[in-house]
Image: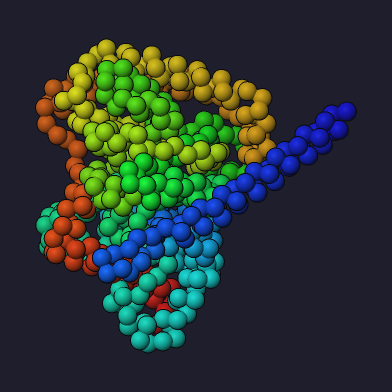
Amino acid sequence: MSEVVGSIRRGILSFLESRAAKKREALVEEVARLKQSLGSTDEFGQRHPFTVSVAIPTFLKDRSELSGYRFEVIQNELIELGHLLRRGLIDEIIIIDGSTKGSGAIDDSLMRLIISTMNRSLSIFHDQVDFIQKYRALRNKAVLGLYDFGVRVIHQLDPEINRILKASKVLPQGLTTGKGAALWLATALSSGDAICFMDSDIRNFQGWQVAALLKPILESWTRPERSTSYSKAYYTRLAVNLDSPERGFYKLGGRATRLFIIPLVRALSKRGALKGFEKLRYPLSGEFAGTRDLLESIEFPSGYDAEMAILIQMWKRALVERIAQVDLGLFQHFPQSDKAIHQMVKQIIQLVVTDLKDHINFDQKLVEDYVSEAMKEVASTQEMYEKAEIRVKIEHEVKRDFYKDLEGDKNKVLAYAEELRAAIMDPGRLQKPSVQRLPSWSGARRDEKGARLLEFMKRRGTTSTVELLSKQGLVAL
């Protein structure tokens, strides 16, 4: 009897999976057609197509990831994006790598592996590489940065980029590593009218997720009011054990979001700060898309507080209604350590306290309100995973057991509350800005010198890619 029930259950799940796959393929086709229908006309009557860039920040924690599951995840993501590039849904893929050696020097091993993978797996990129290898004139153009690669790979500590940033006094001290710095640099290096950012640790990444993020922005593009300028992903986030990804257990992911930001935003909203953001289902998702105008206007901090910084700046400009939320389904990812997440939370606390100190009173009561909201969130999310339909879906897709770490979640909440309390009790932290910000790119477009800087950076992205191709023996310079 149990075998019959199991067979029926598998049949139902297979049917549902097939139907979902057809819907997702239809979504990709719909968004591709929508993109092709858009564009603008300049003052000379020339029509310019609407373009999309996808940017992915990457980094190696250690060199063992080059041959493990971690790189397989990056490789799958690149291959999926390659399909979108070939179909015309996106126009370029920008990889910004932040891998460094123990000395702090650039480690280009991941970039070189990415270049080789894209050359093998993406026909359009392979053909471009083949052309510049065959024809010296094209190769000379590529060396000068004047060749339009569909894939560009560069390190965020690139010496030429840093040289010109220092010389132009945009960043007198040069650029540092960090996720926010990578997003800031990708915004300058890309050329799309819309930019879609994706994290590189999504184990089950699929191309339709990019299409879903782009759809609200594309649908709004021809409207005078541009109702959506930023689309934000939400999902069911699961952390899988990295030591044995194909078996073992999973547990709830999204510690910084689920256990800290969501409850903190609720507490802040009750006091009038970040009003409207309590409706966001996943405020810190690293998967989002925005118009170039919006993203070039953002002052990115250099670290993991970048996503929160975007939201706060949008709230201050009364752009809450311009945000669309997009369901990307079930996300499996390889989690960072609890220590790394704790450091992320500290960065976010510093940002929130600095940016909102003139809008609300930070006091002990806020800490208590946060803890109260966080404990409610712990209970509700743990209960959600007990629902039969959620368990069936996860067991079918993830094929592992759920590890319910209720006490661990509560302990993390209390630890984050202590960090929040420490920030509030430190008067100096409330009196002076302590978040290092990278200047917005919107100002650079207003003068000729800034425009030349941006043009140089885009060319440097191409030159860096050619240099990596040469190092891999794929192009002879």
Horizontal placement of 381 versus 457: left or right? Answer: right
Q: Position of residue 201 (x, y in %)?
A: 47, 47
Along the line of sight, the residue nearer the viewer: 318 or 372: 318
Q: Residue at x 33, y 69 (%)?
A: 46
- Residue 259 x, y percent position in the rendering: 41, 25
Quarter containing the N terminus: top right
User: Is residue 102 something that shows in the picture?
Assistant: no
Give the tally of numbered discs.
0
Instruction: Specify whether 418 is left or right of 327.
Output: left
Q: Say which residue appears at 27% left-offset and 62% top-offset.
A: 158
Rendering coords of residue 371 (x, y %): 36, 16
Residue 18 position (above or below residue 152)? above
Q: Quadrant of residue 477?
A: bottom left
**Residue sitting nearer the eye, 156 or 356:** 356
Identity of the residue drawn at 63% across and 23% down: 387
- Image quarter for residue 9? top right
Above or below 253: residue 223: below
Q: Residue at x 20, y 61 (%)?
A: 162
Colour treatment of the image: rainbow
Q: Position of residue 222 (x, y in %)?
A: 38, 51
Q: Quadrant of residue 317?
A: top left
On screen, residue 99 above or below 434: below
Q: Visible in this render: residue 223?
A: yes
Q: Is residue 205 left or right of residue 180?
A: right
